[in-house]
Amino acid sequence: MSTESAFLEIREIVKDFGGHKAVNHVSIAIAKGEIFALLGSSGCGKTTLLRMLAGFETPTSGSILLDGKDLAGLPPYERPLNMMFQSYALFPHLSVRDNIAFGLKRDKLPSNEVAARVDAMLKLVQLERFGQRKPHQLSGGQQQRVALARSLAKKPQLLLLDEPLGALDKKLREETQIELVNIIHEVGVTCVMVTHDQEEAMTMASRIAVMSEGRFLQVGAPAEIYETPANRFVADFIGNVNLMDGTLVKDEIDHVLVRCADCTHYVGHGITGTEGMAVSVALRPEKIRISREGPSSSDGVDGDFNRVRGTVKDMAYFGSFTVYHLALASGAVLKISASNTERHRDHAIGVGDIAWASWSPTAQVVLTS
Amino acid sequence: MRAATFNRWFGRGWLSLGYAFLYLPIAALVIFSFNDSPVPNVWGRFTLKWYAALTSDTEILNGLWLSLRIAFFTACASVVLGTLAALALVKHRRFVGRTLFSGMLNAPLVMPEVIIGLSLLLMLVAAQKASQAAFGVGFPERGLMTIWLGHLLLGMAYAAVVVQARLKDLNPQLEEAAMDLGARPWQVFWLVTLPMISQALLSAWLLTFTLSLDDVVLSAFLSGPGATTMPLVIFSRARLGLNPSVNAVATLTVALVSIGVIGASLWIARRERLRAADVAAAARYA
Amino acid sequence: MSAVKTGRGWAVIGVPYVWLLLFFLLPFLIVLKISISEMDIASVKDVLTVQNGAIVLNARFSNYVTLVTDDLYFSTYLSSLKYATVTTVLCLAIGYPFAYFMARARATIQPALLMLVMLPFWTSFLLRVYAWKGLLTEHGWAHAVITSTGLDHLLLRAGLIPGEGQLMNTPFSLVLGMTYTYLPFMILPLYSNLAKMDLRLLEAASDLGATAWVAFWKITVPLSKAGIIAGAMLVFIPCVGEYVIPELLGGPQTQMIGRTLWDEFFSNNDWPMASVVAAAMVLLVIVPLALFNKYQAEANEGRA
């Protein structure tokens, strides 16, 4: 995306805490209306970056431009953006209506307009009947909706979400994820969210930035990040993956061969590299087929590629799918995830059985870093 | 489980004896305030004459009036200064001379009052002499004002402790949220912080009020002619021997304090119960 | 906290800071100054004066010398430390189990138990001390109990009372009065500390084979160290300089430095001497004071 059309532009942001760089030269351009997720484990710098956007931390260097306007030096109360906090931070001494109206009253809006806006917000999050309640009289999910309404009341140009679903239990989280995205799309506000939960990032965001140690390791749409990780860290961080180290044996335009300890991969795309270099092959468990007999087809590839035999060491039954741990000759373990498409499978594979794992040439990704 | 049973009975025994020890003198005070007998601590017969005498005891009444005024001003000023000090310590992690500041703030909590009283008096006398020389008027006059200053020093330390404890427990995201929504720093304090620490402010006020009302040593050092606080009156009478008028004052004090403490405890307990009920209801009917 | 530092930050720090400098630190400096000054008939002579165009220092350190060499002052300091220590130990011995059992009581009655400790705490301490006068003088209830059970013989043998039946104005009455008055100051921080203790630690200890007694000494006590120190400081330091209790319940045998200071000031009108006594008293308590300050700071940091 060109920088001219970017709505939120972060340029070479650095945050140095006395020698420790929490955010280390991060740059990104975010388009209007995007939901952009900062994904990483704790300590990676994502929260620091979010707080710099909000104005609670000052960047050591670099700049932030929102709709062309530099936010440097602007205190949080002067920035045209709003944040939804992880703990919701609802004012316990104010009612739901007063909480939502808080920001509007700071802007000295006339009281009838404030009331109208509050009504609209309550309608948006479906809490019309709860206006007079205090926060402690609401459930966790309801509190979250009030926090959302409060952060959208002022029609901010940018909405910041700090672990929006972190405080909810699993069931509620699934329902809320979709609701949240719908509301954000309905309002049409640009959104930057911070999370350590991959599922949250992948279901909600239009683009994800995987962060580690203050840097962006990869930025892209969820599918891109999952199917085409840029490096080992991202491949390992997102979802489950089998990482096999090997040597690049053949490098052609349309395919490469990688020899690993237990098998040789025929990968159906070319990479930039030299023969003989050390690479890793990332293969997701759900893309591997497991069978007692050898692989039924060769996927149009001649030769002993993309298959390996091993012993089933472990099995974990998850209801809709089963995960097999296949012990290979070199001692490595291959994780295979197979959907349980039939209710009772005859000749089902069990622990101790010898089985074949195979995959198509489009299943893997070769990683050079 | 013999150990557990022994523990339980030993515990109950210890607590009972402990409470008996704490309350025995108070009980004695109250009982002997209704005593009519030549020997004050030997029971004669029931009477209310000591209470009646209080109504015409100008020394005590004047002392009470003075003490109440000083206590009121002390409590108000202590809460203000103590809150400022607490805010300074909680909000600003590092500033020049922070150790000295917190040291000066904590010291009055434990420092023997004779030291505080003496040093403060000497300073006020020096100030008096200086202002006499400069402006021809000796300020401040020893009396209500000087006693108030002494109590304020003590009260500020106690108020700071109480308010600090509450400020620490505050979720910092609340103030950040307020700022994010457009509130300037002083608005954040006024609209969010203050309401949330209001209970602590009230406790601090009551604590410093009681402290001031009860103080003997500081008042003795810092008072002037005509400024005899109630504790000083009681003290001088107590020094002379047993005096049932003191018992009467004591009983009234105990009654007031009891009503206050019990009332406050019940009110807090009730609020907690209602709150817990609200939270439970919300979780059920989400 | 917010990275935005407004000018208001300086007012918030500045006002109480200046106040404390003016009304706490400055008075101390003045005390020091006066302690080395000469006393005129009615007022203190200036330490620095200009005579014949030259600055003259009229410092008198003789008062400090007196303090150290005069047996009376020295023994009074020692005696104050002794009584303060005894009181602290007694308060700890009575107060620790008290706070412990309070914290282990059923959760529903704990607020009531706390309230019952608060009540004496909030009642005027002067009145409570006076109450013991009534109880310990002849015909008083405590006096009757102690003499009839023969306890006074024990006290006499221990040197705590000068004669049978003479319970008032003795070391016994003083220590009893001080322990009684300061007991809540020991119980409250201890209770606050013990109530917050994670009981699961004790469960884990018992699971690993520790008896209740062992668990108590190896886990509970060390974890309550902060509470013990806080309580001990809250009792010891003020006790050293106590005036009211020694005056009402003490006697000729019980020399306390607080009374000495008072007498120097009010009876002898010797301000420099009183200042010297005060300055020396500060030195006495400065170590426990620093300990207390450190505890307060740590307790406050720890919470954040």
Image (cartoon, grey):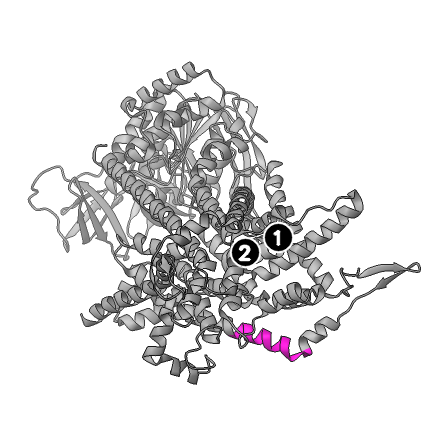
Give the residue furthest to the bottom. Answer: C157
* Numbered badge on residue B232: 2
Towards the viewer: C27 or A282? C27
A301 left or right, relative to A16: left
Residue C81 in magenta stretch: yes
Quarter of the image holding residue C200?
A: bottom left
Q: Which of A203 and A96 is in front in this view?
A: A96
- The answer to whether residue A273 is seen in the rendering is no
Residue C68 in percent (x, y) is at 67, 76
For the C terminus of chain A, the image quarter is top left
Q: Residue at x 45, y 75 (%)?
A: C172
Comes first in the chain, label 2 or label 1:
1
Q: Is residue C60 left or right of residue A21?
A: right
Q: Which residue lies furthest to the front in this view?
A: B38
The label number, if any, that marks residue B223 in the structure image:
1
Rendered position, A12 above or below B144: above
Q: What stretch is highlighted in magenta?
A: C69-82
| Secondary structure beneath label 2 | helix
Residue A2 in view in this figure? yes
Q: Do labels 2 and 1 touch, CB within 8 Å? A: yes
Judged by its main secondary structure, the magenta piece is helix
CA neighbours of label 2 inside 10 A, class few (<14), some (14 to 19), many (20+): many
Q: Is C60 contained in the magenta span?
A: no
- Chain letter of disc 2? B
Query: Is label 1 in a helix, a strand or a loop?
Result: loop
Gap between marks 2 and 1, in whole Å? Answer: 10 Å
Question: Quarter of the image holding residue C190?
Answer: bottom left
Q: Residues within 10 Å of mark 1 (few under 14, many from 20)?
A: many
The disc labelled 2 sits on which kind of residue?
Answer: Leu
> What percent of the width, then of the height, locates residue A44?
44, 44
What chain letter is assigned to the residue under label 1? B
Residue A289 location (% of width, % of height): 20, 42
